[in-house]
Amino acid sequence: MPIGFGHAAGSVRRHRPFAFRPPPDSHPPMNQSARQRLLSLLAILALLGAPRPANADDAPAQVQEPEAARVVLGILGYSRWPATLDAYRLCIAGRADELAALHAHPATVAQRPVHVHDISLDDPQLASACDALYLGAGIPPAQRLQVLGALGDLPVLTINTADGECSEGSMFCLRPGDAHSGATLLLNLDAIARSGIRVNPRVLQITRRESATP
């Protein structure tokens, strides 16, 4: 069940050190049914309050640096793994030029380092080597489906950039913007529930906050 929120990305942004500090994990545990209802409700409220693009004609036709990097760091910050992580191991498969900044500059999330490295989807150690997997461009659909199916019940956070409807089984889908709209972040509630990773519903505010960044 994919839900999502988008914005226009036409404003000029200053590059800042990549650090994301999520709010304290104050939301109490809830069962799967209650979590899905809450996520759905928050998504509807976010959509109702979504701002119109200020300069839609000037919006970029793709997810830009550092926007994509900040969205990915925000997703990590709003997620809680079954076991506490000392560092985030972010694996990148396929072509992901939009995350080049994460390779070039060390990043932290809630004072935990983010270790970024490229990985092949054929790597037999993928599930144990990655806390999060970013699926970039150039990956055949059949291979994406195979990997997502294998990771479905494991605590590996998955972000897909090629699944416009977020129906292939990844937890998050980051859709590039076009000439009339900015990036859109979609969530697959079923995939999130299967993974055992808890996600704060405020993750939907990431793209909205990006649009307000000076």
Image: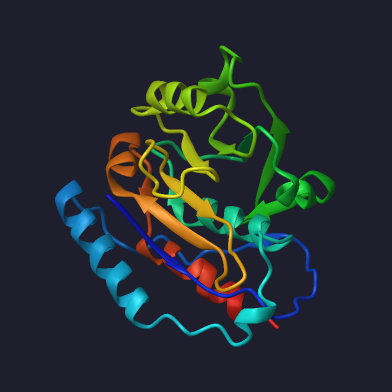
Coordinates of residue 171 in the picture (x, y in percent): 41, 43
Coordinates of residue 140 in the picture (x, y in percent): 55, 27
Q: Residue at x 59, y 77 (%)?
A: 211
Quadrant for residue 123, please give it.
Answer: top right
Q: Residue furthest right?
A: 104
In the picture, which quadrant includes the C terminus? bottom right
**Number of labelled discs?**
0
Judge whether 210 appears above or below 190 on screen: below
For residue 5, side relative to residue 93 (left or right): left
Q: Which residue lies furthest to the top in this view?
A: 124
Quadrant for residue 21, please give it.
Answer: bottom right
Judge whether 50 appears above or below 164 on screen: below
In terms of depth relative to the viewer, which is nearer, 31 or 14? 14
**Colour style of the rendered protein structure:** rainbow
Coordinates of residue 126 in the picture (x, y in percent): 56, 21
Quadrant for residue 148, please give it.
Answer: top left
In terms of depth relative to the viewer, which is nearer, 183 or 193? 183
Judge whether 69 appears above or below 206 on screen: above
For residue 76, side relative to residue 115 (left or right): left
Q: Residue at x 47, y 59 (%)?
A: 185
In terms of depth relative to the viewer, which is nearer, 169 or 79? 169
For residue 168, side relative to residue 121 (left or right): left
Judge whether 98 appears above or below 67 on screen: above
Q: Which residue is drawn at 55% across and 59% down?
A: 74
Q: Residue at x 66, y 63 (%)?
A: 61
For residue 163, side relative to residue 104 (left or right): left
